Amino acid sequence: MSVWVWIGVGLAGGCGAVARALLTHAVNVKAGRAFPYGTLVVNLSGAVVLGVVAGSGLGGDALRIAGTGLIGAYTTFSTWMLETRHAWVTGRRGHAVANVALSLAAGLAAVWLGRVVGRAAF
């Protein structure tokens, strides 16, 4: 990879991380913090976007920058797991199970939908 791709991944990653923080905060302000809706919305919207990128046939350096940099920094597996664990250990086991099941099922549907859109649009 060239230095320009590394720079692109870093800049796109910074944008993705900022977008994640802003959206998570906005969703949590509206929906509250009883359930990790902010992380769920971020991860599902990221799955749709990654599906669109994959379905569009984007490849090479552009895919590295968009997929790894932007979308990789925007979505967050670690926060999803941390919030799930926190719900479990604080006795909200129904929330923990729902978070895993909903994230997995809706995430698969979201990436499928994104791929369909990506193939149709590009």
Image: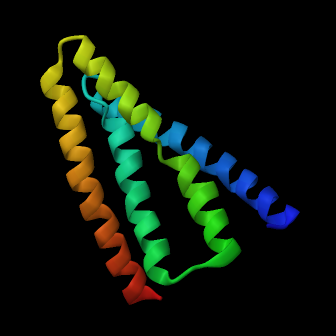
Question: Please, is residue 9 above or below residue 42 in the view?
Answer: below
Tell me if 94 is positioned left or right of 21 in this view. left
65 versus 30 height, above or below: below
Query: Residue 96, position in %: x, y?
Result: 21, 28
Residue at coordinates 66% horizontally, 77% vertically from top-left?
Answer: 60
Measured as percent of width and height from the top left, residue 82 is found at 39, 26
Q: Residue at x 39, y 56 (%)?
A: 45
User: Residue 86 placed where, x, y %?
Assistant: 32, 18
In the picture, the quarter occupied by the N terminus is bottom right
User: Residue at 48% across / 82% down in the picture?
Assistant: 56
Q: Extreme front residue here? A: 1
Q: Quadrant of residue 116?
A: bottom left
Q: Is residue 10 above or below residue 67?
A: above
Q: How is colour applied across the structure in the image?
A: rainbow
- Residue 83 image point, x, y percent: 35, 26
Kindly identify the residue that appears in the image at 46 percent across and 34 percent down: 78
The answer to which image quadrant residue 32 occupies is top left
